[in-house]
Image (cartoon, rainbow, N blue to C red):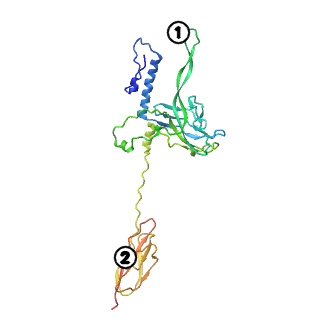
Amino acid sequence: MSTSATSQQAGTGLERVRYVPRMVLGAEDLRLEQDYFRQKLRRHMRFLHGWGVVCGCQVLPAPESQKPWQVRICPGYLLTPQGDEILIGEQALFDLSTCFVQSHDPCAYARPCPPVTKPVDQERHTVYLAVRYLECQSRPVRVAPVGCGCDDADCEYSRIRDAYEFGCLDSLPGTHTPSPVTCEELCKGGVFPCPGCPDDPWVVLATIVTPAAASTALQPGDISLADRRLLYSTAMLQQMALCQCAPAPTPTPSPKPTVATPVINPGTDSFASKVTNVSISDATPGATIFYTLDGTEPTTASKQYTGLFDVPFGNLQVPTLVKAKGVLAGYNDSAMATAAYTWRQIQ
């Protein structure tokens, strides 16, 4: 049975083997059966879950004397833009300057071509440490020769193992651009197009600024996770909902209280001689009172009330205005109090 890729390329669906009695099955048919379920799983991952780092995959500086640009990549789990899963089961040491990886995980690889060179211009450069899905062949077995010949049996790998590859990129992959759908559009609802399957398989783990000098060791501040795309698991989303992880609302500042309006005693009246023992009081504890006798509005530069005072006899045609205002730190200034003293001749 031959494999038809027409339906897959046209996007009309996937094909699987329809088993019937006395069917002769070959390796191609069995591969088709595997591909059917693998492609369905990839499509499920891309459309329903998306892609990104689910957990772990911390990147930390791990310099050594001969490897000042070495980093440690911690275990973790992630999904790629093409729907493949990557499980980093063991920590890996990765040298940015040589792209050489050290790991106990047999599935850990590195790009053979080192894209990062030691700087000669004494400038810092930005590189993107990324990972992508790979497959590696394993478990070679001898395969019987075709026909009746007596030739030595050939060897073929009998297993395909999920693997992954680290690499340094000189630019951010196009898949890491912000979503074209805005938050406003999402909240409004509607019909959104299905995401396509991108050609770029890389998932950025960290953005690293290399030191200007080749012998300078990487520091924690040189490694940023700002360009890492996160993919929250359902369990984590449930926990976030329980924790109500929305940004804390900005507290509304309480309105400042206002100092009570001072009371001038005696109040507005007519006098035939100077007014003695004038007092000013305020109901707000700790308030400082400032006053004037020339009709101007009191300020903190005006005379401060400290005790009883006299108002001298004034012009018969013009009343003397005593104005006062209370002031206290943390409070609004009080309203202005006014007492008008008019003058009359003694009969």
Kind of element beneath mark 1: loop
User: Where is residue 217 shown, x and y percent of the image?
Assistant: 62, 43
Which residue occupies 44% across, 21% down?
32
Which quarter of the rendering shows the N terminus? top left
Q: Is 179 left or right of 123, judged from the image as shown? A: left
State which quadrant residue 281 falls in: bottom left
Q: Which residue is mark 1?
A: 147
Nearer-the-camera pick, 87 or 160: 160
Which quarter of the rendering shows the C terminus? bottom left
State which quadrant residue 74 falls in: top right
Do the residues bearing badges 2 and 1 touch, measured as CB atoms within 8 Å? no
What mark, if any, has residue 338 been given in the picture?
A: 2
Residue at the outermost top position: 148
Q: Is residue 227 above or below residue 276?
A: above
Q: Is residue 182 above or below residue 330?
A: above
User: Where is residue 255 shown, x and y percent of the image?
Assistant: 40, 61
Kind of element beneath mark 2: strand
- N-terminal of the pair, mark 2 or mark 1, is 1
Which residue occupies 34% across, 87% down?
344
Residue at the outermost bottom position: 347
How many marks are shown on the rendered structure? 2
User: Where is residue 214 shown, x and y percent of the image?
Assistant: 63, 42
Which residue occupies 43% across, 27% down?
39
Nearer-the-camera pick, 26 or 311: 26
Residue at the outermost right position: 65
